[in-house]
Amino acid sequence: MPELSQYTLIIKEQHVDSYGHVNNATYLTLYEEARWESITPRGYGFNEIHQKQQGPVILEVNVKFIKEIRLRESITITTKLLKYEGKVGQMVQQMIKEDGTVASEAVLTFGLFDMKARKLILPTPEWKKALAME
């Protein structure tokens, strides 16, 4: 499946720990930020989620820390949909340094959650558009 997005940012002081590299918990925050930047321009942002009462939920995350990312480095986070079968999808995100080195990789299992019914639902046409499936 095609790449959903690329999101570039500079690592700031609040992202690093006492060792001078990105704190392990911050990786999840940055990956989430990149996902929001991917789906929001495709019409599935915070307001639409609360209007529809349907939104993405993460079911599982596997993060690999491959190379350290330091203060003031520029990184690009890529997001790619791997598969979406029934109610459950899988995507991969990578943090890539300016020299092309993959610093981190996260494989996420996710679904679309109906906030009223309190359960996973099949992807809607709007959700498929947000994921560039249509």
Image (spheres, rainbow, N blue to C red):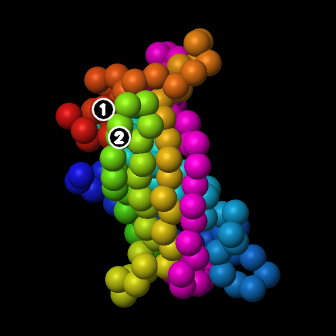
Most distant residue in the left direction: 134
Residue type at numbered disc 1? Lys
Most distant residue in the front direction: 86
Q: Quadrant of residue 87?
A: top left
> Viewer-proximal residue, 17 or 14?
17
Which residue is pictured at 35% across the width and 83% down the height? 100
- Asked if residue 61 lies in the magenta stretch, the reply is yes
Q: Which mark is residue 1?
A: none
The stretch in magenta equals 46-74
Which residue is pictured at 29% across the width and 23% down the height? 125
As drawn, is 89 to the left or to the right of 31? left
For residue 69, above or below residue 77: below
Q: Which residue is mark 2?
A: 84
Which residue is pictured at 37% across the width and 62% down the height? 78
**Upstream in sequence: badge 2 or badge 1:** 2
Asked if one can make out residue 45 in the rendered structure from this viewpoint, the answer is no
Q: Position of residue 10 (x, y in %)?
A: 51, 71
Which residue is pictured at 36% across the width and 87% down the height? 99
Q: Would you call the spot at circle 1 few (<14 residues within 10 Å), some (14-19), or many (20 or more)?
A: some
Residue type at numbered disc 2? Tyr
Element under disc 1: helix
> Viewer-proximal residue, 12 or 76?
76
Q: Position of residue 13 (x, y in %)?
A: 68, 73
Q: Which residue is mark 1?
A: 128
Asked if one can make out residue 82 in the rendered structure from this viewpoint, the answer is yes
- Asked if residue 76 lies in the magenta stretch, the reply is no
How many numbered discs?
A: 2
As drawn, is 122 to the left or to the right of 42? right
> Viewer-proximal residue, 71 or 95?
95
